[in-house]
Amino acid sequence: MKRKKAGSLKRTVIGLVTALLIGLFLLIGSFMYINTKKAIEQTVRETAVLHAERIAESIDPEVYSDFLENPKKDQTYEKLRIQLNDYREKIGAMYVYTLQADGQDSLGIMVDGMEKAEDAVAIGEPTTATGYKDVAAVFEGETAATEIVSDPDYGDYMSAFAPIKDASGNVVGVLGVDLEANIVKTIIQNVMKNSIPLLIAGLLGALALLLGILFFFLTKRLNPLARLNRAAALVSNGNIHEAKEETQTFQAASNDEIGVLSGSIQTMIETLEGMLQDIQLHSVEVRDQSDSLYKMSHHMKESSSQIAVTMEEMATATEQQAEAAAGISEGMNRFSSLVLETAEQGSAISGSSNEVMQRTREGEKLMTSAIDQMDKTHVTVRQSVQKVTELEAKTNEVQALVSFISGVADQTNLLALNAAIEAARAGDAGKGFAVVAEEVRKLSDQVSTSVQGIQRIVQSVNETTNEVASFLEQGLQQVEESKNGLNQTGAAFKDITGEIHSMDDAIKKMQSRLQEVLTRQSEMSNALTEVAAISEQNAAGIEEVTASAEQMNHLAEVTQSQVDKLQVMSGELDELNRKFTL
């Protein structure tokens, strides 16, 4: 067996203690950092409050009261702003200003102590991050300060507030001082920078001292375990005698767990030595008995295997015979069913054939009637084509007459025009003739108009006649094609009728033969059923005998397997005995 790499209890304990000490030191350092940060913030906050109190005391309350009565950027405001800016620059603050309550919800900046007047906020400008609750105590005459706040307009800062009191001690305003948050962060960084190295050096020194003491203590206390480990290693390698000598030459001086363990290991080695001596004596007897049992079981297994193989072959042959007989019987049953279905389908086909024959005769009659009707239609369409052709010729004649009349009307109109010209030359004598010529001209115009209308009608009739003639020609051609198709269909119907007659005769003969086959098949099926039943009985008997033989063979195999295992275990026991040196 592959031995795992040995570990060190001493290193484990030292590592665990080191981790605990480092965790403890880190926890102490974290607490110191948090407390230092809070202390610095509190110190800065108290310093800011002191600055606010000193600045508030330096403001003349009468001047500030006069300003509040008429708050505007005048000389009084400028005096107060310059005074506040001077203090702002001296203490290094972001902003120094005065506040006035605007109701109970908001605060307004009255004087903003900036360096330039244009940089100062307007009088009454509401605060963005400071609320009335932050300075409520200041209006009662006390001081107040905030944590570091984040203002969206002015950045991160810390605010301190002090009351501005008049001679009677009444609060007339609030003075605010805003210190930049970076000042607090810078102070914290400087303090940490100066104290952290000393803290780390002290903690590392303490850690090294504690680990040295722990290492010396563990080395002295855990040394007996190494001797016990060597004795256990000798036992695991089979050197019982050497392990016994190792424990006898070593005796733990302490009465703790290590001393108790040493005594227990000595007792264990002595007990193990006695057990191994008894095992070696009995293993020789077990080996001799297993050899004899192995030979007997081997002979029994060979005999039972031969019997099982023979019976299995007989059972297989009988089963195959029974399966073949059953398969043939089943096949005959399926064949009988198919023959019966075929006979039934033959009867159905015969009935369908008779019906098809009847439908074919009716179809042949209808086809003959359709051919006669198509012949009549063909004659009618051909006559229509002839009539339309004659109509087209007559229309052409009318067109010629209309053209002739149109020419006469044009000549008459021309003559009437000439007559009117001549009547005009004749003067009064030709007035009557002019009237007649005018009437003739009008009549000629009417005739021309009528002739044009007739000409349009004749032309439309001629076009329609041409279209009808074209359609009739196409219809005549289609009728001739349909007539030819019907003649071919009629011939095909006659051929189909002949084939159906032949098919009907063949179906009747097939039905007669199927009845004969059905009778013979029933006799064969009964005989095969009897053969299959006898084969199944024989197979069942042989299977029972085979099962008994297989069971006996299985028992022989189990016995042989157990004997083999016993022999293997006997060999392994001998190998184990040889590993131990007593």
Image (cartoon, rainbow, N blue to C red):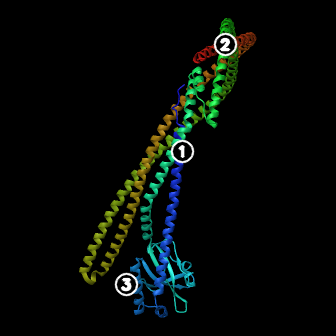
| Residue 215 % position (x, y) | 51, 42
| Image position of 566 (left or right of 384) | right
Q: The C terminus appears in which quarter of the rendering?
A: top right
Q: The N terminus appears in which quarter of the rendering?
A: top right
Report the front residue among 443 and 16: 16
Distance from the alpha carbon under mark 2 to that under mark 1? 50 Å
Asked whether the viewer can see residue 498, the reply is no
Mark 2, secondary structure of its residue: helix
Distance from the alpha carbon under mark 3 to that under mark 2? 114 Å
Which badge, 3 or 2, comes first in the chain's sequence?
3
| Residue 7 % position (x, y) | 52, 35
Residue 16: assigned label: 1
Near mark 1 (Cα within 10 A), the count class, few <14, some 14-19 or many ≥20, is few
Near mark 2 (Cα within 10 A), the count class, few <14, some 14-19 or many ≥20, is few
Q: Height in image: 346 above or below 482?
A: above
| Image position of 148 (left or right of 398) | right
| Residue 193 % position (x, y) | 42, 62
| Residue where numbered disc 3 is placed | 118
Mark 1, secondary structure of its residue: helix
The amino acid beneath tag 3 is Glu
Q: Height in image: 437 above or below 164?
A: above
The amino acid beneath tag 1 is Leu
The amino acid beneath tag 2 is Leu
Label 3 close to label 1 by CB (< 8 Å)? no
Residue 134: assigned label: none
Q: Height in image: 204 above or below 453?
A: above
| Residue where numbered disc 2 is placed | 281
Which badge, 3 or 1, comes first in the chain's sequence?
1
Nearer to us of marks 3 and 2 is: 2
Label 2 close to label 1 by CB (< 8 Å)? no
Nearer to us of marks 3 and 1 is: 1
| Residue 541 % position (x, y) | 75, 10
